[in-house]
């Protein structure tokens, strides 16, 4: 799965700020564009993991359903 991200130069502190518009509140930064991109990848993975964990806690009758994991590439 691919996400578009927005990278902006941080004029106040130097480096770069990056965010993923598809994932509200998913931001990161880095000293270089490459570092910022690596950091936003980690932020996206953490964001999606947290979303999934929260959704799974909300399952009703968890003992009556099958839960399987799928990889999305």
Image: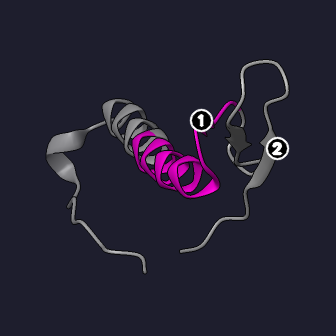
* Residue 40 belongs to the span the image colors magenta: yes
Q: Residue at x 47, y 54 (%)?
A: 38
Q: Residue at x 14, y 43 (%)?
A: 63
**SS state under label 2:** strand
Q: Residue furthest bottom?
A: 73
* First of labels 2, 1 by sequence position: 2
**SS state under label 1:** strand
Viewer-nearest residue: 21 or 29: 29
Boundaries of the magenta span: 25-46
Quadrant, the C terminus: bottom left
Residue 39: x %, y % from top left: 48, 45
State the mark number for residue 57. Answer: none
Say if 46 sits above or below 71 in the image.
above
Q: Main secondary structure of the magenta part?
A: helix
State the mark number for residue 28. Answer: 1
Q: Residue at x 85, y 27 (%)?
A: 11
Tag 2 residue: 8
Name the quadrant containing residue 31.
top right
Callout in the foreground (2, 1): 2
Viewer-nearest residue: 26 or 68: 26
Task: Find the distance from the CA under tag 2 to the CA under tag 1.
Answer: 11 Å
Residue 65: x %, y % from top left: 23, 55
Residue 49: x %, y % from top left: 37, 44
Q: Residue furthest front?
A: 14
Is residue 12 left or right of 57 when viewed as pictured? right
């Amino acid at each position: 799965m691919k996400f578009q991200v927005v990278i902006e130069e941080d004029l106040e502190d130097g480096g770069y700020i990056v965010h993923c518009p598809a994932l509200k509140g998913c931001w990161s930064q880095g000293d270089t564009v490459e570092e910022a991109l690596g950091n936003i990848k980690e932020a996206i993975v953490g964001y999606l993991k947290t979303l999934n964990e929260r959704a799974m806690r909300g399952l009703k009758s968890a003992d009556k359903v099958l839960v399987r994991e799928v990889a999305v590439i």
